[in-house]
């Protein structure tokens, strides 16, 4: 009987000496925090008179944003009976409050093809409901408006 108690005591001592290295906490690593993406309305007011002589004035207006890869630009739709063009940019990274540089945006307008900017403009452009007023390289082929986009898809001019 003494031998049985000794064996039982040794077994108990042996199992209590094993340390459980598993700590409580998450099993998986936390997932990375991807940038939040929103959809943003785009409106462009085209000049009424087409002074272009090199291309068709009935060509579509195209929108470009700095977050877009080449080839992701899209055409805006013209309102019936007017010179207002509209569209929705999808997958726009949120950058307001300012955490990074402002996005740059512009359109290609066939009405302005013969101008020094060769049809690329940021004038008369509303993004996320905000008329953009901060324009870089005005009147050149590099012309672009600066805009911040908030969590609600609202555009904001830089300070």
Image (cartoon, grey):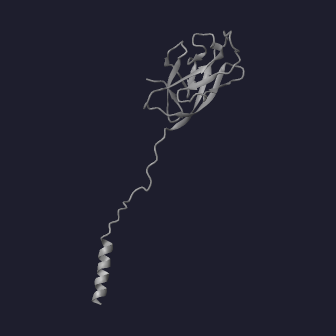
x and y, in percent, of residue 51 in the image = 66, 9
For the point 28% across and 83% down, the residue is 6
Quadrant of the rendered structure where residue 114 is? top right
For the point 32% across and 66% down, the residue is 19
Quadrant of the rendered structure where residue 7 is? bottom left
x and y, in percent, of residue 20 in the image = 35, 65
x and y, in percent, of residue 106 in the image = 56, 21
The count of marks equals 0
Q: Is residue 43 left or right of residue 5?
A: right
Rendered position, 60 above or below 38: above
Quadrant of the rendered structure where residue 118 is? top right
Figure quadrant of the N terminus: bottom left
For the point 50% across and 18% down, the residue is 135
Q: Is residue 121 left or right of residue 13?
A: right
For the point 43% across and 51% down, the residue is 29
Figure quadrant of the C terminus: top left
x and y, in percent, of residue 143 in the image = 53, 17
């Amino acid at each position: 009987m003494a031998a049985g108690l000794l064996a039982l005591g040794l077994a108990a001592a042996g199992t209590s000496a094993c340390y459980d290295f598993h700590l409580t906490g998450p099993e998986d690593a936390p997932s990375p925090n991807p940038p939040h993406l929103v959809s943003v309305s785009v409106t462009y007011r085209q000049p009424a008179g087409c002074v272009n002589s090199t291309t068709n004035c009935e060509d579509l207006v195209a929108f470009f944003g700095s977050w877009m890869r080449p080839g992701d630009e899209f055409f805006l739709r013209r309102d019936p009976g007017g010179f207002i063009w509209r569209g929705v940019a999808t997958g726009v990274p949120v950058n307001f409050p300012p955490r990074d540089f402002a996005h740059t945006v512009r359109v290609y307008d066939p009405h302005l093809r013969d101008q020094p900017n060769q049809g690329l403009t940021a004038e008369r452009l509303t993004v996320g409901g905000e008329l953009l007023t901060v324009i870089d390289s005005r009147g050149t082929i590099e012309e672009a408006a600066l805009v911040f986009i908030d969590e609600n898809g609202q555009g904001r001019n830089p300070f």
